Amino acid sequence: MSFLRRSANLIVYEWRRALAKKKFYLLVILAFVLQIGVLALFNYLFTNPPPQFPVEALLEGMKPLMWIVGALGPQNLFMPLIAIIIAGGSMSEEYEHGTADILLSKPITKLEYITGKYLGGLTLLSFVVALTTALGVILSFAFFGPQESLQFVPHLYAAIVYANLIFFSLAFMLSEVFRGSTLAMLAAIGILVASIVISSFLSIMYGLTGGQQIYMDITKLLPNWSASSFPSFLLAELVTVPTSPFLTVQSGEVFLAGAIIAVYTAVSILIAALRLVRSDVTKKAD
């Protein structure tokens, strides 16, 4: 059996493992609910503006681009959480259930094993992103009529998948390092929450100190900055979005954000691979 065939079997196995989690379905449903709720709220605002609300001035040009709001809706919170849930138990559950020894007793190398596990979770995450992106576009048509710049939907989809490599890879690494699903997921979620809190604090300090660049430089090193900013930065290079308080797509350091994602991802994969290759797979933790 070839390397590709063995890896493909592990990808299918990883889908089955992840799809057995109730937490996974809950987060996906919540992401869908968020999308529907946000777009329904905007639709109500468009059709029933409050008195004295300058709806024409603020919302001018937004309707044809509401697919962006729909697609980006789950990105800052639910997509990283879904990535963590998928990857956080990927390696560790095999140790907890004693199946790592069984899988590696087959004619399969450790490299094939970790490759299949990683790609299996990543393809599942990519499928979820495809569902949320498609739902955002469909709901935008339903609520707001014909949409514009739809040729860039694949670009935004790819950007969202790429952005979520950070927390997916971090959770995957922690799953192998700790070899405990609960600990790995809690650690990954802790990194996500800490990144959000610290970046908010640094933004406040940036404003209070009159714009000292050191605070922004530190913010850019946090995983949350590139994960949340990269899709928006890339979209700003492709689509001209009217100025509006309800739709924020800002030009930024798209190459820097992309490079930071690549570094976090590469380091996480390397650590996970070294941990697997150099340790005894029968041990839950060293």
Image (spheres, rainbow, N blue to C red):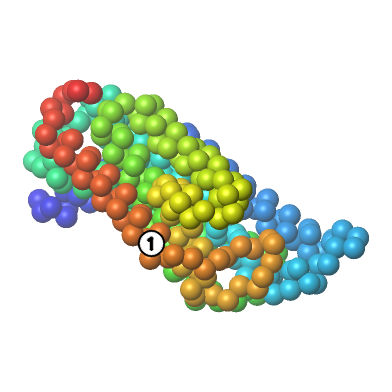
Find residue 102 and report its horizontal and vertical position in percent: 16, 30
Q: Residue at x 33, y 59 (%)?
A: 259
Residue that lies at the very extreme toward the right in this rendered image: 51
Quadrant of the rendering where the C terminus is positioned? top left
- Indicate left or right for 236 with 59 as reference: left
Query: Does residue 121 show up?
Result: no
Find residue 285 and report its horizontal and vertical position in percent: 23, 23
Which class describes the residues within 10 Å of circle 1: few (<14), some (14-19), or many (20+)? some
Find residue 178 and report its horizontal and vertical position in percent: 28, 28
Find residue 131 and report its horizontal and vertical position in percent: 49, 56
Q: Amino acid at mark 1?
A: Leu
Give the total of numbered labels.
1
Q: Residue at x 20, y 31 (%)?
A: 100
- Indicate left or right for 61 with 120 as reference: right
Residue position marked by numbered label 1 in the rendering: 256
197, 286: nearer the viewer = 197
Residue 98: image quadrant is top left
86, 227: nearer the viewer = 227
Q: Residue at x 48, y 73 (%)?
A: 237
As helix, strand or loop, the secondary structure at mark 1 comes to: helix
Q: Residue at x 17, y 53 (%)?
A: 5
Compared to 79, does 161 lie above or below? below
Query: Does residue 165 show up?
Result: yes
275, 134: nearer the viewer = 275
Residue 50: image quadrant is bottom right
- Indicate left or right for 243 with 1 as reference: right
Compared to 265, does 134 lie above or below? below
